[in-house]
Amino acid sequence: MKKALSKIAFSIAIGLLFSIQLFAQSGGYTAYKFLNLTNSARVAALGANFLTIHDNDLSLALANPSLISTKMHNTLSLNFVDNFAGTHYGFASYGFNLQKFGSFAGTMQYSNYGKSDQTTETGEIIGQFNAGEYAFNLGWGRMLDSVFSIGANVKAIYSGLDIYNSFGMAVDVAGSYVPNETFCASLLFRNIGMQLTSYTSADTEPLPFEIQAGISKKLAHVPFRYSLLLQHLEKWDLGYTDPNAPVDPFTGEAATQSGMENFADNAMSHIVIGGEFIPAKFLSIRLGYNYLRRKEMKVESVPGMVGFSWGLGINVSKFSFSYSRSAYHEVGSPNYISVSTNLGDWSKN
């Protein structure tokens, strides 16, 4: 039965993969961008929207279903993000095992954009409208053998923006190599799918498809784990035309990078680095750096800490708490809060 499930999940994923166009999908050219929002404080602290750490943390399973394990059974994870301009979003996940079918993680995801003014073309306010997006994710994972694991998510998506709404479906597929408790390497294909209905009568839009990979390693003699993540592997050049770029005074053309500078810039744009210092079993101190985020979001005159992130993890009694901040812009940084517990522990004497 487990082998049959794995074949079905990957057959669906491959079918959807070949039904979409794998062109450069960046900026505002895709629907349902909220699917790539960072879903936990631990992930945010390490600088990205996914991790490759195999330590039975349910909050990591949404972005990397190959991490779903039997030890997540009866675990509940709640995650809340206080985002910009009064908006917020969150995730509620529950892990469970079905003996004949494998290990699962169900997640309800929402993004609340609050109320906005509805105006005429001249700016006259005539009312207000609400906007929000939701996704239900069912993840499944299993170990193929002693070192390889696989997993998949199936996502039902709804987006409502005033009188406009859209439905969609997507699948994530992932695989991990876990030779021991200190090392993990993963490859992920995210948001393989399509809009089932569009916002208007126009053509449907593509989803924010992305290929990601990464490794994590816990050092043998130092209480430290490093993480090296690769994002947007489906596209090499992540640059864009900056209208404010400096202009050559002699030619009047925008200044360009040399070949080596351009190569280095593109290479670094794909890399996210992070680290966890674990001085005690109950405490983790986390740091991360996202080069692409800093390049795109910083203000040249006041770069500040844009692109950097930090956070703390604390285990107290039956609870695990995480808090982090990730600097996206000088105007402020979102607050990430995560709480998890194993409900089975509460029934033990």
Image (cartoon, rainbow, N blue to C red):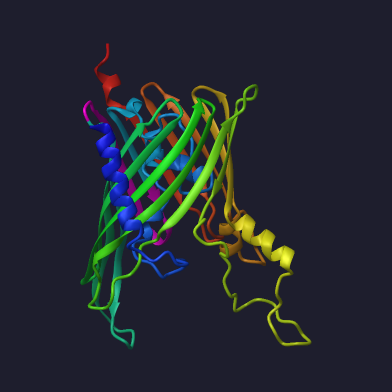
Q: Nearer the viewer, residue 196 or 272?
A: 196
Query: Looking at the figure, which quarter contains the C terminus?
Result: top left
Kindly indicate the quadrant of the structure image that contains residue 197: bottom left
- Tell me if 245 is positioned left or right of 166 in this view: right
Quarter of the image where one finds residue 219 = top right
Number of numbered labels in the structure image: 0
Q: Quadrant of residue 220?
A: top right
Q: Residue at x 57, y 71 (%)?
A: 240
Does the magenta-highlighted stretch encompass residue 97? yes
Residue extent of the magenta highlight = 81-100
Residue 138 in view: no
Horizontal side of 311 relative to 318 (left or right) equals right
Residue 241 shown left or right of residue 188 in the figure: right
Q: Position of residue 280 (x, y in %)?
A: 55, 22
Task: Provide residue 239's location: percent of width, then percent of height.
Answer: 58, 67
Query: Where residue 322 sits: x, y (%)?
Result: 44, 36
